[in-house]
Amino acid sequence: LNTNCSNAYVKNAQVVVMNADRAGEYDSGADLLFAAEEGSAGEQALKDNGISNYIPVYDQATAMMEVAAGTADACVIDLTMANAMTGSDTSYETLTIVTDLTSEEYGVGFRKGSDVTEEFNRIMKELMNDGTLDALAEKYQLTLVKGE
């Protein structure tokens, strides 16, 4: 590699979203019809988990609309979008995140050998410790990686 990477600070995942009143059906082994954005990480997560009963749709918003309309039982979308679009005071109050199918963490890449990586990690740790990152994560519906 020709880059140094910072410590991970934000998590994303491909998550299953369903109507809250049907969420228990996910674990029951029921035959569910999924919706996922065609060509997306969500579609790949379905395939990787052996789920072939799905309809490919134009985008993640359409996948959520399919679930809300009842034409799909569940959808697979990014965790960040699911956090922003589901639950109380959203357009999809009745939808909820059921489980993660995949998980990934994000950091920042810097030129190999740069001392900026260490300084970035130090500053991010300070911002994590003083609550600044928590406030930003809440504002932008992000999931922080807690740890280092």
Image (cartoon, rainbow, N blue to C red):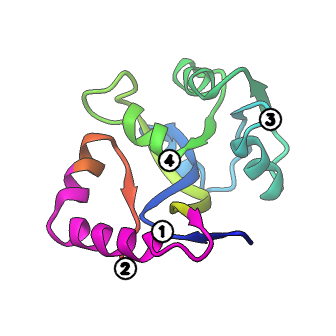
Dividing the picture into quarters, in which one does residue 94 lie?
top left
Q: Are marks 2 and 1 in contact (CB under 8 Å)?
A: yes
| Circle 2 residue | 147
Give the secondary structure at mark 3.
loop
| Circle 3 residue | 39
Give the quarter of the figure containing the C terminus. Answer: bottom left
Image label count: 4
Q: Is residue 107 above or below residue 30?
A: below
Please tell me whether residue 82 belongs to the stretch shown in magenta. Answer: no
Most extreme residue toward the front is 114
Dividing the picture into quarters, in which one does residue 49 lie?
bottom right
Mark 4 or mark 1, which is nearer the start of the sequence?
Answer: 1
Give the secondary structure at mark 1.
loop
Amino acid carrying label 1: it is Ala
| Circle 1 residue | 8
How many residues crowd mark 4 within 10 Å: few (<14), some (14–19), many (20+)? many
How many residues crowd mark 1 within 10 Å: few (<14), some (14–19), many (20+)? some
| Circle 4 residue | 79
How many residues crowd mark 3 within 10 Å: few (<14), some (14–19), many (20+)? few
Q: Please indicate whether residue 58 sits to the left or right of residue 22 in the image.
A: right
Question: Which residues fall within the magenta stretch?
Answer: 110-135
Amino acid carrying label 2: it is Gly
Give the secondary structure at mark 2.
loop
Mark 3 or mark 4, which is nearer the start of the sequence?
Answer: 3
Q: CA distance from mark 2 to mark 3?
A: 32 Å
The image shows residue 106 at horizontal and vertical percentages of 53, 60
Q: CA distance from mark 1 to mark 4?
A: 16 Å
Q: Main SS type for the magenta part? A: helix
Dividing the picture into quarters, in which one does residue 41 lie?
top right
